[in-house]
Amino acid sequence: MFGRNKTVNEQQAETVDRTPRDGAKNRPTPKRKDQEAANRRPLVVADRKEAKNQDRAKRREAQLLQRQAMATGDDAHLPARDKGPVRRFIRDHVDARWNVGEFMLPVMVVVLALSFVKVPAVFLFVSVGVYALLLAAAVDSWLMWRRLKKHLVAKFGAAKVGRGLAMYAVMRGFQLRRSRMPRPLVKRGEFPS
């Protein structure tokens, strides 16, 4: 409305075919109005049911990739809790050793079964045994973390050994080896270097 009309020379200049040059853009700069129109999206989707279905499909696909990564150890699709070379080193170190904590669950099942026995001597023996196992698991976890921390500092530096890594290692050590996620990728005795 308020813009000027193009002259004949300007109209002809637009239609002239220019030879492409290396390193040049080789196309006219788009008008701002056209770029804004191309980038414009509605705030509220017109078909909400279709948008909901697309969102559900994207989430399902992401969950499938994450589940596969938990089984294969693919670092690109692991959850943030398990990503990175430091966490992989911790997992491999914990999976390579025998941990006292991983025997806690089977022992607790036996303790539960023995708790129904009404013999005081058996109850005393089971109680003392459970506390001894808890103490042994705590000491084993503490020793494991001290040894693992030395390896982490030597390999990655003190700056990479942050908060939360000790609990990550200890909690992995208390899980049964078959139920650990991400799945163990090393055999027992194959410590990472």
Image (cartoon, grey):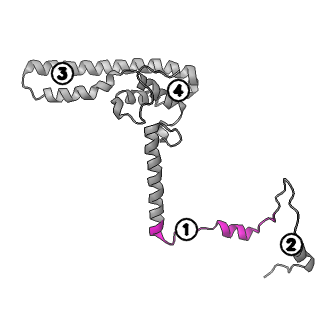
Mark 4 or mark 2, whichever is nearer to me: 2
Q: Secondary structure at mark 3?
A: helix
Q: Is residue 48 magenta-colored?
A: yes
| Gap between marks 3 and 4 measured at Cα | 37 Å
Identify the residue at image location x=85%, y=79%.
Answer: 4
Identify the residue at image location x=48%, y=56%.
Answer: 58
43 or 91: nearer the eye? 91
Disc on res. 193: none
Q: What amino acid type should be assigned to the residue bearing mark 3?
A: Ser
Q: What amino acid type should be assigned to the residue bearing mark 4?
A: Val
Mark 2 or mark 1, whichever is nearer to me: 2
Label 1 vs 4, first from the N-terminus: 1
Q: What amino acid type should be assigned to the residue bearing mark 2?
A: Glu
- Label 3: few (<14), some or many (≥20) within 10 Å? some
Q: What amino acid type should be assigned to the residue bearing mark 1?
A: Leu
Q: Which residue is mark 2?
A: 14
Q: Which residue is mark 3?
A: 127
Q: Are marks 1 and 4 in contact (CB under 8 Å)?
A: no
Q: Secondary structure at mark 2?
A: helix
